Every structure is written in C-alpha cells, then in structure tokens.
C-alpha cells in the first residue's frame, strides 16, 4: 500500500486501487481495504474505510472532499496521477 492524496486527504491504497478510483471503477474490495486518514496529523485523527469515507450519510464532509477528485501521489513522490502514463 502507498499513501495517495485524494481531495487533500491521505488515503492508503494499492496502485491498482488508485487507478481504479481514478477510472471510476472502484471495487467492493477497494472500498473495504483502502483506508482514509481523517484530520491527519491532528491529535483527534482517525482512520476509516474508503466505504465509510465516501458515504455522505456517515461522513458528509469527507465525502464532499473526495468527490470528483483524483488519487495522486504526494509532491515528494512526483505528484503522479495514478493510472496515467
């Protein structure tokens, strides 16, 4: 797993999961296995599944942050968009 940025949030996912996210083809397995760090760096930071993070009823603010955003590697890793060549 690598840490990608999606809408300013740190998301731990495989390169394949990131490419599927960017293509709009996220699987149930991706939703269960990928982890989103909410409020990273803060004392109250927490980790939730991608399924929970994208659920507008359970995590409305987080879901809004991730909506229509691409998974990218952090700037120190070159800022590459997953799934691009």
Image: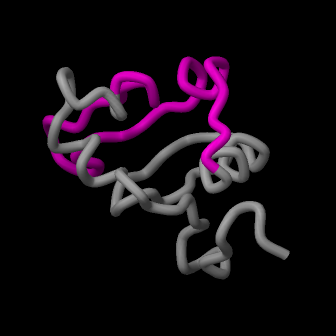
Up/down of 79 relative to 11, above or below: below
Query: Count the marks: how many?
Result: 0
Q: Quadrant of the N terminus?
A: top right
What residue is at 28 percent from the left and 41 percent from the top?
63
Per the rendered image, the range of residues in magenta is: 24-52
Q: Report the side of 38 relative to 35 (left or right).
A: left
Q: Report the side of 18 relative to 61 (left or right).
A: right
Q: Quadrant of the C terminus?
A: bottom right
Residue farthest front in this picture: 24
What residue is at 63 percent from the left and 40 percent from the top?
13
Q: Is residue 41 highlighted in magenta?
A: yes
Up/down of 69 relative to 76, above or below: above
Q: Report the side of 62 relative to 30 (left or right).
A: left
**Residue 10, horizontal then vertical, whole percent:** 43, 51
Compare residues 37 and 60 and report the one nearer the observer. 60
Compare residues 61 and 42 and report the one nearer the observer. 61
Q: Quadrant of residue 20?
A: top right
Q: Report the side of 25 relative to 12 (left or right).
A: right
**Residue 31, horizontal then vertical, whole percent:** 54, 25
What residue is at 63 percent from the left and 28 percent from the top?
30
The image's colouring method is one colour
**Residue 66, horizontal then vertical, whole percent:** 36, 51
Compare residues 80 and 55 and report the one nearer the observer. 55
Q: Quadrant of residue 68?
A: bottom left
């Amino acid at each position: 797993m690598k840490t990608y940025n999606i809408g300013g949030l740190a998301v731990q996912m495989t390169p394949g999961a990131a490419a599927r996210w960017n293509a709009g083809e996220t699987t149930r397995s991706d939703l269960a296995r990928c982890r989103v760090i909410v409020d990273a760096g803060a004392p109250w930071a927490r980790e939730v599944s991608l399924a929970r993070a994208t659920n507008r009823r359970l995590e409305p603010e987080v879901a809004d942050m991730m909506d229509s955003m691409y998974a990218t590697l952090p700037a120190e890793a070159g800022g590459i968009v997953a799934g691009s060549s």
